[in-house]
Image (cartoon, rainbow, N blue to C red):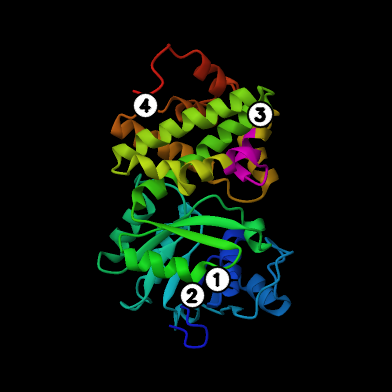
Amino acid sequence: MNTTTGKAKIAVIGAGSWGTALAIQCARAGCQTRLWGRDQELMAVMERERINPRYLPNAPFPDLLHVADSLADVIADANDVLVAIPSHGFRAQLQQLQPLLRQDQRLCWATKGFEITTGLLPHEVVREVFGTGRPVAVLSGPTFAREVGAGLPTAMTIASSSESYADSLARDLSSSHFRAYTSNDIVGVEVGGAVKNVLAIGAGLSDGLGYGANARIAVINRGLIEMMRLGVALGARRETFMGLAGLGDLVLTCTDDQSRNRRFGLMLARGLSVDAAQREIGQVVEGFKAARAVHDVAARKEVAMPICEAIHGVLYGGQPVDQVVRGLMERPVRAEFD
């Protein structure tokens, strides 16, 4: 522990918008924080100018946040290592960390989504790379990086099979404007984080086509049912999806244009191609790859997910963009809950 502040020393891996925002929050909360990213030229600029000019130019670094020169340096004296990179690079980053981490260092991540090639959730990838025995946790919930960086009030969930680790990490990250809640349902929290990005594309498609607020809430609500079905099939608890990492993150991502996934759907509805929409956004659209992974996992588990299936059809099958909402409306009459 950091004897000066009483809180842990935290290393944050990934200097995109979300990794930077989390590093800023860790430092604001009193943790000695070091941040590392692959772009060493950008890292040098960040340390010199005390901002991330590429991703969060309006969020100055607190005094306790510094940029590390190398991966080994960033984790050297850390109590906790927090990985905040897109899901497609998650395993490769863990493999780089594996020979460097000491057994007494705890590992957490803010990466969302199934692994594309295997359909594994992040905690399952962690288990394959590191084995068991190390305290691990996942951070998720309704958060936009820009608002966290700006110090606006925020709440999120930290899930771990270790109650003591979840509680310790939540206390280290919490401050007067940032509240972390704890959970022991890692599967539920991770499924919520993966599926919500796909559904946000659907909400963007619906709004971009001018279908109105009624259609948007139908996509959100029925999408939540699909999220629950898949989560329960994978071993999650149903009540987790009514919390911050389920309903909270879903509503946020589907209704605010800070969401890259929602903006992606809006652009597709305007007639842009998938490639053109991704280029215009300029950052990773997690829901695009997540749609394929969710489709594959749902098929393997024989879980009915008609909205996610329609979104997958638009992105990968060339289906018309109005297929998502129209397909929902044309489904056979049935009981709402079954």
Is residue 92 positioned above or below 235 on the image?
Answer: below
Q: Are discs 4 and 3 less than 8 Å apart at CB? A: no
Indicate the quadrant where residue 133 lies. bottom left
Give the image location of residue 86, x and y in percent.
Answer: 51, 55
Mark in the foreground, 1 or 2 = 1
Upstream in the sequence, badge 2 or badge 4?
A: 2
Q: CA distance from mark 1 to mark 2?
A: 7 Å
Amino acid residing under circle 3:
Asp
Element assignment for label 3: helix
Give the image location of residue 325, x and y in percent.
Answer: 56, 21
- Residue located at (50% from left, 30% from top): 221
User: Label 4: which residue?
Assistant: 304
Give the image location of residue 295, x and y in percent.
Answer: 41, 33
Upstream in the sequence, badge 1 or badge 4?
A: 1
Q: CA distance from mark 2 to mark 4?
A: 41 Å
Element assignment for label 4: loop
Is residue 311 positioned above or below 259 on the image?
Answer: above
Which dot marks residue 10?
2
Indicate the quadrant where residue 233 lies. top left
User: Label 1: which residue?
Assistant: 26
User: Label 3: which residue?
Assistant: 207
Indicate the quadrant where residue 262 lies. top right
In the rendered image, which quarter contains the C terminus?
A: top left
Toward the viewer: 330 or 251? Answer: 251
